[in-house]
Image (cartoon, rainbow, N blue to C red):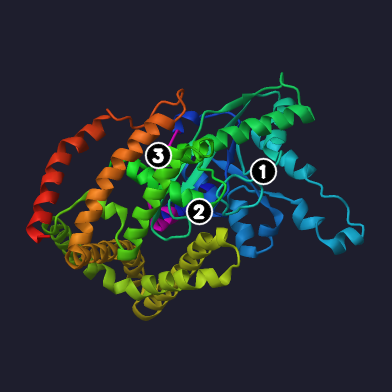
Amino acid sequence: MAYRILAWFLRTVTQVFFRQIEIVGLEHVPTEGPVVFAGNHPNSLIDPILIITTCGRKVHFAAKDQLFKGRLMRAVLRGLGAVPIKRRDDHDGVPQQAASGAPPVDNDAAFTAMFDVLGEGGAIGIFPEGLSHDEAHLSRLKTGAARLALGAAHRTHRTITVVPCGLTFIHPKRFRSRVLVQYGPPLVLDEAIANTPERVREVTDEIGASLRRLTVNAPDWDTVRALDVVRRLYQPQEISIEERVELARRFNTYYAQVAGDPRVVGLMGKVGAHQDRLDELGITDRELARDLSKLEVAARVGRHLVLLAFWLPLAMPGAPMHVLPLAFGRFASGKLTPRRDVVATTKLLIGLLLVLLGYAVAIGLAGWKFGLWAAVALAILLPLSGWATLRVLDRVRLVRRGFGVLFRRLAFRREVLSLRGERMRLVELVVATVGVVKPAELAALFPIDHPDRRIEESSKARRDADLDAELDKDGP
């Protein structure tokens, strides 16, 4: 019961923190039987929360024992059935401990507890990378997941299913961003498979290959950003997060093979120059791609203003209790932690604790001053007001963006028209180049004759005519 309550609460928290959570591959998750979820680890405590709230199974996570020191965290982790693991870096990697002859780290009890969970048909979650990080690629995997799965298969005489889980955050540190949770094809292990160090390494490599198929990996973030520009030019408009991530993964996976091709070098130079022009004017590629007229932009801004006016009255009663913690979490989170991979977790925890504290104080005062029913009414009103505040903040962001687009359309009219024409030519060049240099065995996700591209092509003639007409109207 405690797990279900905590899982429901965490699901609500993630739906508040993220604007969109896209879940793919749930058909790969067995509804019963022992399962080991093996995920990548880019965003600290948010990673296990996302797996817990999306996989449909009760998951017992292996968590470093340092997290169990705090009373509150210990209670939450125990409620979620977490198993404390001693990491070598935390215990015998400190010089004074080594000098004092500290005993080697012993995780036999932890593995026994996890074997028991799997033996009862339960699910264990583990991050083979070990530490959370913000690198542009997977870290070298540790062998814990493979040792756990193979050991459980031999100890319990049951078939163990290892389900890889890829977590991809569009903006990892940002509140109200989007995330893709992707479960891949499982790896099935039984006691017939030898539990030897060599086989452990092989299974670890198989898990790593599965995770690389579900995540975006590049040598550095500069490469990721450069190829992200190419990806935006290549893709049709309005694709899903899954398709966006798959395109990014493909570009980053195969780019090294063709980076020296003169056609690719020339393309990257033109794309980089185009992005530099956009950056100078403060214009986003999305604005050019959508190609909305000033009237269409104004209509969208008007619609968002109407919705803003609708939600604002409900948001006002609890606005100080919601906006101030969000603002504090946004500006203070980076200063409270030196690690960039825990910024989002810090934001989530700060905002959550401050909001809950504010709720408790307000409801307590209402009950003390006005009685039980006033406290009950406020306990209902405050969450509704919080949800309305999210709607208001989302609409404010969209209205601000809309006014920015209108301003740039008016202030940089000729530049926008020129960039729009340049973008059309670059799209054709990117699509053609990708079609030539991609591996022959790799099927294009969005080939030239893809239906979405044909729809865009049907409107290209209209856009070209409008562009020529506007440029001619401006004169030489």
Q: Residue 387 at what x, y percent from top left? A: 32, 61
Q: Could you tell me the amino acid type at mark 3?
A: Glu
How many numbered marks are there?
A: 3
**Residue 140, labelled with which disc?**
1
Q: Is residue 354 magenta?
A: no
Q: How would you rate the neighbour count of disc 2 (Cα within 10 Å): few for under 14, some for 14-19, many for 20 or more? A: few
Dot 2 corresponds to which residue? 222
Residue nearest the viewer, comparing 105 with 6 = 105
Q: Which element type, helix, strand or loop, lies under badge 3?
A: helix
Q: Is residue 364 above or below residue 345?
A: below
**Residue at (65% x, 50% y) in the render:** 63
The secondary structure type at the circle numbered 2 is: helix
Label pair 1/2, CB-CB below 8 angstroms: no
Q: Nearer the viewer, residue 77 or 300?
A: 300
Is residue 363 left or right of 112 when viewed as pictured? left
- Crowd rating for badge 3 (residues with CA inside 10 Å; few <14, some 14–19, many 20+): some
Query: Which residue ends up furthest to the front in the rendered image?
Result: 476
Calculate the distance from the C-alpha at mark 2 to the C-alpha at mark 3.
22 Å
Residue at 59 percent of width and 44 percent of height: 138
Residue kind at label 2, given as amino acid type: Asp
Residue drawn at (56%, 61%) of the image: 340
For the record, the magenta segment spans: 13-25
Mark 1 or 2: in front is: 2
